[in-house]
Amino acid sequence: MKIFIVIIASITLVMLLVWSRPESKAELRPLPVARVLATQVKEVDIRPVTTLKGKLQPARHAGLRFELSGRVIERMVEPGNRVAAGDLLLKIDDGDFIDKYEEAEALLKQEEQAIARDRKLLELIVKEREIQEREVSRMQTLGQESLASKSNFDAALQAVLKLKAEESRLRHSVETAGSRLQSQRARLSQAARNLERTRLTAPFAATVNKVTFETGDYANAGEVAVEIVQLEQLDIYLEVTSDMISVLQLGQQVDVITPKGPVQGHIVAIESDPQPDTLTHALRVRIDGRGLFPGQLAEVSLPGDTLENVAAVPLSAILYDEGRSYVFVIEDDRLQRVPVKKLVRQDDIQSVAGVNSGAIVVASDVAALADGQKVTTE
């Protein structure tokens, strides 16, 4: 019973204290005066830089193919081998092609000899025909004086006609010798090229990446037999917009960040006509490949067109709030939060629209500040 009385008394006391408490009044305390670093909005010329990433690829890549079909009889290289320009990589059976070459070579020699023979025969025929014509002329004179028989004259005249016919044939042979020699030489050149095509050689100094055929395999013409890549120089393939490509040019030096550190590269190719689906232009940058490998990522800094006389503030002066950008303008020692539109950035300078050149803004540590706050400047 005593416990119950104590509880009732305690509750009554608490209620009396609650009812008798004074009413509280909310008081607005002024924001403390902040000490800030101020800077002036300046008009500057800014050349924006766009950074794009791309994979390193061999500067030169070739899939080498036989132009003729045949069985592989020699395999001279393996993947990873370094080769020089002209080094033999693979060879197919060349027996039939050797025979074709030797046949064409023999026919050319025969033709040259036949032409030389016909030239000599033509000289002899011309002399013999001239002698025979003089004889016919002499017999014709004797015939008029009745000193020669008509049958001897006819025989001599017939000999002249035969000599003329043979002379005409030989002269035609000599006159067309050039075209016949050209035809035989073309046949020999074709046979030589086909014989050379049995040997697959490196067109440039490179590293062997893949060998498709083993010795004894049958290689069809047109199949990739050996892949080679040039690793001394590597390319980065990028896609850029039309406004960027207008200020880029072949041979231009650009900064590249690679896994081994910063290097200098240069633009080696620019696609003038954009891709129809993306409306972007393909661009290729070449760098020294020493210490790097295809497939690694690299960052390329591409300069844009220069913006002249634009308002700019330090990057640290920008306040980001709910997806929008602001700067704190200082007027009469108080802050005014002004929305701005970011244009382009260069290093730690941000060009903006929405604030006038010459305005005084807070340069850093803007996240802790508020609109209307009183400040002092350093």
Image: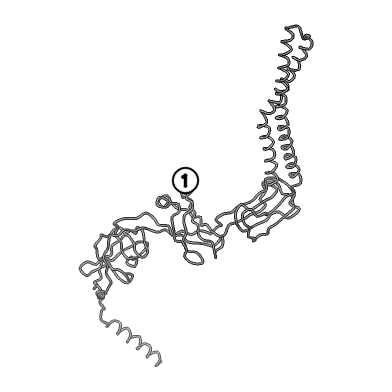
On the image, the x and y values in percent for residue 47 come to 36, 58
Quadrant of the drawing holding the N terminus: bottom left
On the image, the x and y values in percent for residue 294 come to 56, 60
Quadrant of the drawing holding the C terminus: bottom left
Residue at image x 69%, y 53%? 90
In the depicted view, which residue is nearer to us: 179 or 312?
179
On the image, the x and y values in percent for residue 117 come to 73, 31
Amino acid tagged 1:
Asp
In the depicted view, which residue is nearer to us: 172 or 161?
161
On the image, the x and y values in percent for residue 113 come to 73, 35
Whether residue 235 is situated above or below residue 318 in the rendered picture: above
Q: Quadrant of residue 322?
A: bottom left
Count residues near mark 1 (Cα–Cα under 10 Å), then give few for <14, some for 14-19, many for 20+: few
In the depicted view, which residue is nearer to us: 265 or 316?
265
Check disc 1 and report the residue beneath it.
273
Colour scheme of this structure image?
Answer: one colour
Count all numbered tags in the image, as a single digit: 1
Whether residue 38 is situated above or below residue 212 in the rendered picture: below
Residue 28 in view, yes or no:
no
Q: Quadrant of residue 159?
A: top right
* 258 on left or right of 326: right
For numbered disc 1, what is the local secondary structure? loop
Whether residue 40 is situated above or below residue 251 in the rendered picture: below
Q: Quadrant of residue 342?
A: bottom left
Residue at image x 74%, y 42%? 102
In the depicted view, which residue is nearer to us: 154 or 45?
154
Residue at image x 27%, y 82%? 21
Residue 38 in view, yes or no:
yes
Question: In the displayed image of the protein, which residue is found farthest to the left?
Answer: 332
